[in-house]
Image (cartoon, grey):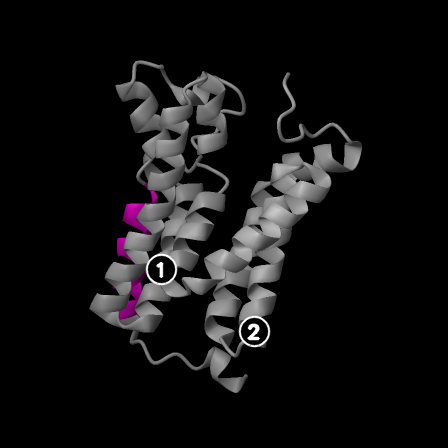
Amino acid sequence: MTDIFTWQITLPLALAALVCGYLLGSIPFGLILTRAAGLGDIRSIGSGNIGATNVLRTGNKKIAAATLLLDALKATVAALIGWYAFGPEGGLLAGFAAFIGHLFPVWLGFKGGKGVATYIGTLLGVAPWMVLVFAAVWLGCAKITRYSSLSALVATVIVPIVLFALGQPKIGLVMAIMTVISWLKHHENIRRLLAGTESKIGQKG
């Protein structure tokens, strides 16, 4: 576990990976797609979020699905570019930066999404098998609780634990940091969950 703090990547390459990842992650696909479809500014409805969940509030399921896919893939692409250009550690840093870019895009006054899709996309780029773990936890929790947000939050906790258990401390550390940030971004959902007012899967209104 001591190698968790021993990184081989040089500072210039680490910075390059972070910048590349951030720029890719900050592409606001939700905003771009809804505007292109003539649905207006997604930030003016619902939660004001640019992610797929808020896009779904427009009633256009295809645009919401496309947003979800592209928000995930931008992190995957960032991680893969970082991996091939700067090595495994560069890929991990680029994926992390894409996650941060989605949450805090400079183009939108640092007001972005909540990061679940880019979290999954980063996993797909740096530890593909863990996407199955995330999906299994999400599905199991969703079946029991019917809360999508809670299921995602629980999955983000399990992922780094499994990574540490499998001897992947660096990936586990980065994903754990992303988990903490994701929980902070979901503070309103957590408040509603505690109050019993969070919408359940399939619930209307």
Q: Quadrant of the C terminus?
A: top right
Q: Quadrant of the N terminus?
A: bottom right
What residue is rendered at 69% in x and 39% in y?
Answer: 190
Mark 1 neighbour density, 10 Å: few (under 14) some (14–19) many (20 or more)? many
Predominant secondary structure, magenta span: helix
Left or right of 185: which side holds 13?
left
Residue 109 shows up from this direction: no
Outermost residue toward the right? 195
Which quadrant holds residue 27? top left
Rendered location of residue 81, percent (x, y): 24, 60
> Identity of the amino acid at label 1?
Gly
Look at the numbered disc 2 and give the secondary structure of its residue.
Answer: helix
> Identity of the amino acid at label 2?
Phe
What residue is rendered at 22% in x and 67% in y?
Answer: 84
Look at the numbered disc 1 and give the secondary structure of its residue.
Answer: helix
Rendered location of residue 98, percent (x, y): 36, 51
- Report the disc number at residue 164: 2
Outermost residue toward the bottom? 2
Pick the front one: 61 or 17: 61
Q: Which residue is mark 1?
A: 125
Rendered location of residue 136, percent (x, y): 57, 54
What residue is rendered at 40% in x and 32% in y?
Answer: 65
User: Is residue 15 in the magenta section?
Assistant: yes
Which of the marked residues, 1 or 2, is nearer the chain's N terminus? 1
- The magenta segment is 13-26
Q: Is residue 160 above or below residue 196?
A: below
Left or right of 8: which side holds 86?
left
Outermost residue toward the left? 85
User: Is residue 73 in the magenta section?
Assistant: no
Mark 2 neighbour density, 10 Å: few (under 14) some (14–19) many (20 or more)? some
